Amino acid sequence: MQRTPDTGLSRRDLLAAGAVTVAATTAGSSARAEGAAEIAPANEVVVALQTQMQISFTINGTVKELNVDTRTTLLDALREHLHLTGTKKGCDHGQCGACTVMVDGVRINSCLTLAVMHEGDSITTIEGLGQPGELHPMQAAFVSRDGYQCGYCTPGQICSAVAVLNEIEAGVPSHVTGDLTAAPEASVDELRERMSGNICRCGAYSNIIDAISDVSRSPA
Amino acid sequence: MKFDSAATTNPIDRLKVIGQPLDRIDGPLKTTGKAPYAYERHDIVADPAYGHVIGATIAKGRITAMDLSAAERAPGVLAVVTARNAGVLKKGNYNTAHLLGGPDIQHYHQAVALVVAESFEQARAAAHLVRIDYKAEPGRFDLHAAKGSATAPEPSDLTGPIDTHVGDFPRAFAQAAVRLDETYTTPDQSHAMMEPHATLASWEGDSLTVWTSNQMVAWSTGELATTLGIPPEKVRLISPYIGGGFGSKLFLRADVVLAALGARAAGRPVKVALQRPLIANNTTHRPATIQRVRLGAERDGTITAIGHESWSGDLEGGGPETAVGQTRLLYAGANRMTSMRLAVLDLPEGNAMRAPGEAPGLMALEIAMDEMAEKLGIDPVEFRIRNDTQVDPEHPERPFSARPFVQCLRLGAERFGWDRRNARPGQIRDGRWLIGLGMAAGFRNNLLAKSGARVRLDNLGVVTVETDMTDIGTGSYTIIAQTAAEMMGVPMEQVRVVLGDSSFPVSAGSGGQWGAASSTAGVYAACVKLREEVARKLSLNSADAEFVDGEVRVGNRSIRLQAAAAEGDLVAEDRMEYGDITEKMQQSTFAGHFVEVAVDSATGESRIRRMLAVCAAGRILNPKSARSQVIGAMTMGAGAALMEELAVDTRRGFFVNHDLVGYEVPVHADIPHQEVVFLDETDPMSTPLKAKGVGELGICGVGAAVANAIYNATGVRVRDYPITLDKHLDRLPDVA
Amino acid sequence: MRPFTYERATTPAEAAAAAAHTQGARFIAGGTNLLDLMKLQIETPPHLIDVNGLGLDNIEATEDGGLRIGALVSNTNLAADPRVRRDYGLLARALLAGASGQLRNKATTAGNLLQRTRCPYFYDTAQPCNKRQPGSGCAAIGGFTRQLGVIGTSDACIATHPSDMAVALRALDATVETVRADGATRSIPMADFHRLPGDTPHVETALETGELITSVVLPKPLGGRHIYRKVRDRASYAFALVSVGAVLQPDGTGRVALGGVAHKPWRGEAAESEMPRGANAVVGQLLAGARPTRENAFKITLVERTLASILVEAKG
């Protein structure tokens, strides 16, 4: 295969591509160096470009620095690089909610965002909420209400539930909010709608809503 | 220990721990993300390579060419495993199709290769560089088209008899005063558990260890050895946490085999999770059925003829969906018939999903009962009660061990406010919503399987239970701990439970709702043995010894339990086996399901407002985790009634909606508060704990209860599941 | 997912320029659809330009009484904006009917407009699809079509546009503001933004290569009743079978746009003149020429009944 550094990328693009040195290969050189990969745009021109990047973010209050493939999702960075496996991969396509984490307090699906897009962000995972022996009130409520079965969607449910109560507190409306101009309340209908991005195939929903209701009713 | 006569009073009956609604002991781990699932064992293997599975893109035919060169040259790639380079692979007994396909392709997304690379991202990218040419062959993909070619399958332990006849069904049906003859369909369904099939495999010499997600440790250990052609003692399978199974993880799947092959090829540990878009077609599913139900009755509602036939399909060599089973036992009736026919289809492999047989079977039978009640002008609850039977209708000399079916229905009707139901459908409105109430019977046999355990007492008084039993969300950890705590007279905190390791005594495993009753019976047996060991060590007469509050008491003597282990751990191992007790009596579990739905009068969308299940399943070992089993099953049943369907492309031969966007399962907003009531019951014919299974009972009948409620709301009868709006939209009242 | 390089852009013009001279480069904002598609190699950009730092995340009043919504305003923040909730209820309702809380927190206004179809054959890369691979054919036609388009379809493609938000924007006569690689800006009416499939179903919008959406502009409020009904099998977190968005005035006039029926949000201003005569008359004209399949013909009835129900609600 012919290799040429002419990809149509400007020098500015290449510099922008990584905070670390760009390694554009010359003809014939190996494209399999650490941190480099072959890219074949439509014109079949092949070049090795920097596809590893250094990132720094705060996970559960601790600054973490990682060198990751640009393709690495936040989810895989957590699970495979940082070994924070509490955040689950159920579908890897934003269809189940098992990977829910909070970024700067806002819940998102960590499977549909790249690690490199979170430079400087503060991320809270299930491990950041509580530990066995010192459970977060939401975790404790899930235990006492049996709001889980196989446990695989559970961290996502709990992260989502914590964020949902914050969203209601902040006045964010939902699909079932009756009066859009009024402040929403933590009714069971509101909780069910807002939690619907977290699928539980074991079907613990009824108990999960009981658990969240317990927490929302308890004095802050 | 052999269980061959009715249980008498034993230490379990103290109910200090058993029967209490205790929090699960694995709760703190699961709610903090600390419970390690198969793909997450960084604690054991520091630097595994990653495998990405490639699925066949035709339904039937052959691979004609495969070019791995680009993938093999791709960055980070360590190995590409295919049938060509994997060596001889045998097929295990539990699978119909090969887990690694090629050159022959038996179904869409059958695994044909595994790309192993240093990183997940590299493996996934390289998988797209594998070039495969196929020659597709025509296949049979349409159950309705193949129905005429269906034949009687070979009977097996799983199927029971293929055709049954009692009395003279044709004559009785022909002569019945009131008759119903309707056909119902249920679609292919997907387990859609949240944790994908996942395995971490590691070789040490010729010994293989797999950390995987599997319901049946011993079965799958043996199947893995068979598949790879290595001695079973060279395989260790570890499955302590399982992110849902529902039958999809009963058997060895491609992730296990490919992880093992990948690890061998790459020379280092490899982990593999099936990609979500592959799962529906790569793994098993609940097969679709066509079911004909015929009921004949006298005007007073006495059933005189009951017939149920079912057609389903599977790959060559597969089995039928046993949708007629419950009809042999649920209602009285002197003249009866059931029949199953199986068509060969080239769709992916059909197999067990939560309550195989009964779940789809009751979806049909219990609509038929509702329709018949209406024809007779009898309340549906009353109609069922009128046809209760306390004996096996095919063998009247064989009684049920316990059958409080009528109590389930009566209590359910009372709790639900059934008397407020308007028997005339389509009458109740709440704004734009049409409101309906529906009910159905729930029925699932109590299956038991021999189950072993090892129990250890140490000098701190800690009791450790080891068994290869699995906890798939069912609460096994907790009820096993409760069993050991009750038997040994120690608090729950003094019990440790270790599960899911093939090096432990073989248990019943998790399936067919046999797990709870069987595995706790095995722990009971081991604990009886340990009690004897303790008594012997303490020079006490074990028959007189009472184990309570961490002490062993005989008369007014009392010794700390751990004293027995002062010189070293005491270990006892045993298993529970069953005599012909289940032959003499029929053991089943029962429920009454009650549902209220609202149907949007304009759009036809059905939403469930209330659900109640009243269950009779022997002693409830832990009402909290048992309730969870039932509400979970009710939720899956609601999905089956309202939305779940693997859509078959009958030209191309695959399930089109093969992800969690396309295959909709219920979300929070679909499920109201669910009420579950357990009858206070013990069944001494089941096990020494007098408990029966409950994990599948909850799904049995609930779909029909939803269907009947929708009918009550709309007056439009839909007999093809799922009951989506397009099936009744054109028959709903005008919008005004 | 193919390897790609990644940069963070700092100004809209710079981002557009970067995209224009890197063949196949893509902007990434929320990423909720793009990354999904990249994992399946339906999208294979060699270079991603992260536009989240462009500062396009404000909602401002326009001089003529409308709102200018920054391209990067999240679906959540847009639906929660007090002005949107008060004056553009249809938009808030449509947004809140879409996806899940987690996805709405990440999904942006521009990204929502650009999301690609959910046709299952488009998503299965083993199947022919003219949208994914021009000229390869359409496996959906003659296949499983329950969710697919009923009007404006072609022999090349019967996919639908999945957005709820876009339906509301179409009914509200929003315009899409962009910047091109050469720094030139333009406004594209929603009516012209999405295309019908025709022979080129892979060309989905009026955007040129590298053209970057900077904002969406809402005209001044219309008043009236704003109703958005999304009809689906499950109660939440599902794409629409059909959706009907309407703005209805006390005098019986109004606007209506549909989702789930076509390759773009479906609206016919002429059909709206029939509004006082009822849903049957409106839908008869709005969906005239529909070419449903046997599996999705129910959508015609469903649209009509849903609109009829909306008209009842508006009167109530």
Image (cartoon, rainbow, N blue to C red):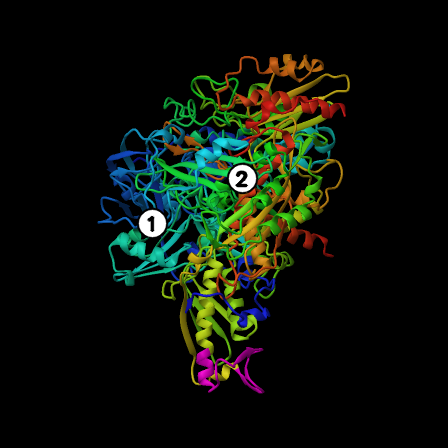
Q: Would residue B605 appear left or right of B571 to someone viewing this image?
A: right
Helix or strand or loop: what does disc 2 sit on? strand
List x then y, in percent, for residue C303: 60, 22
Q: Range of the magenta residues?
A: B532-560
Helix or strand or loop: what does disc 1 sit on? loop
Task: Give amino acid for label 2.
Answer: Ile
Q: Chain of mark 2?
A: B
Q: CA distance from mark 2 to mark 1?
A: 39 Å
Up-down relation of residue B558 to residue B503 (above or below): below
Up-down relation of residue B683 to residue C24 (above or below): below
Q: Quadrant of the N terminus of chain B?
A: bottom left
| Residue where numbered disc 2 is placed | B303
Q: Chain of mark 1?
A: B
Give the camera-side residue of B30 and B378.
Answer: B378
Residue C101 visible to the viewer: yes
List x then y, in percent, for residue B606: 61, 34
The verdict on residue B541 being magenta is yes
| Residue where numbered disc 1 is placed | B94
Up-down relation of residue B571 to residue A183 (above or below): below
How busy is the neighbourhood of tag 2: few (under 14 within 10 Å), some, or many (20 plus)? many
Closest to the camera, between mark 2 and mark 1, is 2
What residue is drawn where x is 47% and y is 69%? B524
Q: Quadrant of the C terminus of chain B?
A: top right
List x then y, in percent, for residue C53: 57, 39
How busy is the neighbourhood of tag 1: few (under 14 within 10 Å), some, or many (20 plus)? some
Task: Give amino acid for label 1.
Answer: Tyr
The answer to which of marks 2 and 1 sits earlier in the sequence is 1
Residue A12 visible to the viewer: no
